[in-house]
Structures are given as structure tokens and as C-alpha cells.
Image (spheres, helix red, strand yellow):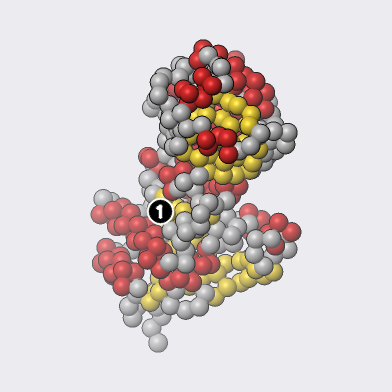
Amino acid sequence: MKELRKIKIVVAGPFAAGKTQFINTVSDIKTVATEKKTSATNERSVKDYTTVAMDFGKIKIDDEHELYLFGTPGQSRFDFMWEILGEGALGIIVLVDSTDPKTFHEARRIINFFQSRFPVPIVVGANKQDLPNAWSPDDVKFALDISDDEGIPVIPLSAKNKEDVKKVLLTLLDIIRYSLESS
Amino acid sequence: MALTGDLTTFNFADILQVLAKDKKSGVLLVEWKDMIVAYYVKDGEIVFARPVDKVFRVYTDRNFDQLIKRLRIRKEDIHKTIERFFIPRLDQKEGIFSFTPGFIKYDSDIPVYYPVEELIMRASRNLTEEEVERKISDEMLVFEKSPDADSKLARVKLTEEERKVLSLVNGSRTVADIRKESGLDRLTVDRALYGFLAAGIIRRKRKERVQKPSITLDLLAKIIDKIKQL
């Protein structure tokens, strides 16, 4: 049986940014997750289970190719996994919880990490825009210190909404296409 | 859309940065431990501050000129409210903030005694080691001066140490290089860089190296079609 070629996109972001939900929304399979009960008290108050190694979903493209969406663990104590997962990625999606400004600096740190190691296109997804106290995408962009010349669009979304998730993926793929066409 | 958060995790340099970038107007309410203060923001600049006993009072005064007339404050004196209720609180870390854009109407020009860049630099001088680490998270980061650095610098009074740090930002030195070459202690350097970054005086140097995507255009087109059909 012919082995399918795997194409990889990494979905990164701080703790509880909605990475697993993002993948689940578009994946053909139920996300293969490596979740564990949260241990720290402050984490437990946000959610009961968290990704500790990675989780992934996939989308079959044709008989020869599958697109894999790899979700990284959110806590910085697992950042060794970011390096492993970033290797060979076509692009990076960094999700941010737009209602939680205390995670914005961590999101920037994640962007810095991937920018310095894997110079591939990055898109930021300003998640949880369906909640009333969400910061606008522009304000998230300013808070993350994303300057125009960095070429990182900030796209509003709710990771539960399939059309929103598709829009983020298509934005990333368009940047990749532009990069291919201009190289 | 309101901006809300906690000063313990999103400090004043960060808040002012967001207000200034978009030149927002509105009211920033801060619930300090001992009082609630309303900071009036016009085009990204804090122009006036007043303590309020009840929050709803802020929202009933929608005309700024009428408000200061009613409070019997002369325009040339309104900066004193910033000296009294804002600047001395820059070292306080506990408080809940909420910025509501829009609703206040500014009929006339309001003098700006403390430009936002100046306030951002003052706020950055009070940051703890843990706070500066949030922006200056990697000693390999490289900064360069922003295209409009000079116009922003004209609005701020830098300390001698800050001037020294800024002189070392050239688009090639790393944070580690600047710390070493300045001869200053690490926190002083990092606070200055944090402030410059928040004030838009410097920006991250974009890496020129871009990895060519390891995929053909045909396959990429297939992926795009597939995503569209989901």
C-alpha cells in the first residue's frame, strides 16, 4: 500500500487559546490527543484537561496527500515540543484567546520562537471573538507588537466555527502561495 | 469593543501602547485598591484624570468641555490631575482596567502636557524583572529604530541610560550585545528596550531569511480547493 505524503501545519498558542478546538473543527478524524488532567491550580480553573505532548488532526487532500494539523502544548514548560513539531512545517498558526490579555505576551514569545527557528509564514488567529469581552483583532495586533512589515495577519475567529477556521487556514495558504510564486 | 484586563499581567506601558497605536479616544477606568480613577483619553493621549466614587458618573458626563467647566478646572491646569492621579501610581501593580472607546465628546483642543511616549517611558521605568521578560524574552532579539523614531523621540525626555541604550540599537546588535556594550545593569537596559518598543521608537528587526515552502504550486492549489470545500 502506497504511503501517503504528509503535509504539516502547526497550530500553536498559549494555554487555553483553543488549539484543540480549532483542529477538531476541520479534522476528518477525531483529534488524536495526548491530554492529561491539568495540575496547576490556575490551569485547573480554566479547563480540566490540557495537551501535554501534541494533538493532531488530518484532512485528506487526495489519494497521495494528507494535511496534518499539529497542535502544540500551550504551557511553556513543554516548549521543547514546539521545536520538534515546527520542523518541516509549511506554516504556523498562532492562536490567541482574545478575551485574556494576560496571555498576549506568551503569544508573542511563541511567535518569536517560531520566527527565529522556522522562517515560514505565520498567521495569528484572534480566537473567541464570539465572547463579549474579546479584544478586537486590531487591538490584539497592537498588544502583540506585530508591525506591518512582519507580514503576520491577525484574523478574527471562533474556533468552533468551521468557516472561521477555514478562513484562517486559507489566509495562511495564500501567504504560502504568494511566497512560492515570488521565489 | 471594550479593552479590559488586570494590571498584574498587562501593565501601563502595554495599555498605553494599544491606546496610542490606534489613537483611541474614550475613558480608561482603573479600579485601584483604594479608589477608582477615570483617565480621559483623546487621540491616544491621556489628557485628564479624576477619581470617581460611582462608575456610572463617568458615563453621564459625555461632553468633556462641560465636564471640566462643571468641575471648575481650567484647561491649563488639567495636566495637574495626571501628576496627581496617574504618574505616582505607575509603580502600583494591582488594579483592574477597562477602556471604553467613543462616548466622550471633546469639543476643543486639549493641551497635552505628558505625551503618551513620555508616559510609556515613565511606566517602563517601574517594570519588574518578570514584567520586562514578557517583551524582552530572548537575548537574541534584534531591534532597529522605527521609521518615525525621531518624531516620537521629540516628545519624550530620556534618561542618560536610555539614550545610551538607544544609541546601541542599530538593527544588528542583539539584546545580549546591548546589555554587554552598554555597561548598564540588565534590568535598566531591558526596561529601556521595553519602553522604546511600546512607544514605537524601536521595532523588531525582521529576519531576511525566508524558507522556501517545500511544496509545489499544484499541490498547494489542491489543498486550497480542499479547504474551501470543507
Instruction: Tell me which amino acid carries mark 1.
Output: Ile
Tell me the chain of label 1: A
Image side of residue B12 versus residue B171, left or right: right
| Position above or below: B187 against B101 | above
Residue B107 percent coordinates (x, y): 40, 24
Frontmost residue, A57 versus A15: A15
Q: Is residue B44 visible?
A: no
| Residue located 60% across and 57% down the image | A15
Image side of residue B71 versus residue B32, left or right: left
Residue B46 percent coordinates (x, y): 52, 26
| Residue located 54% across and 75% down the image | A32
- Residue on which disc 1 sits: A155
| Position above or below: B7 against A46 | above
| Residue located 31% across and 73% down the image | B229
Frontmost residue, B50 versus B47: B50
| Circle 1 Cα neighbour tier, 10 Å, few/some/many (<14 / 14–19 / ≥20) | many
Residue B55 percent coordinates (x, y): 60, 38
| Residue located 55% across and 13% down the image | B77
Label 1's element? Answer: strand
Frontmost residue, A106 versus A101: A101
Q: Is residue B88 visible?
A: yes
Frontmost residue, B122 versus A75: B122
Please tell me how many numbered marks the rendered image carries: 1
Specify the quadrant of the image occupied by residue A41: bottom right
Q: Quadrant of the C terminus of chain B?
A: bottom left
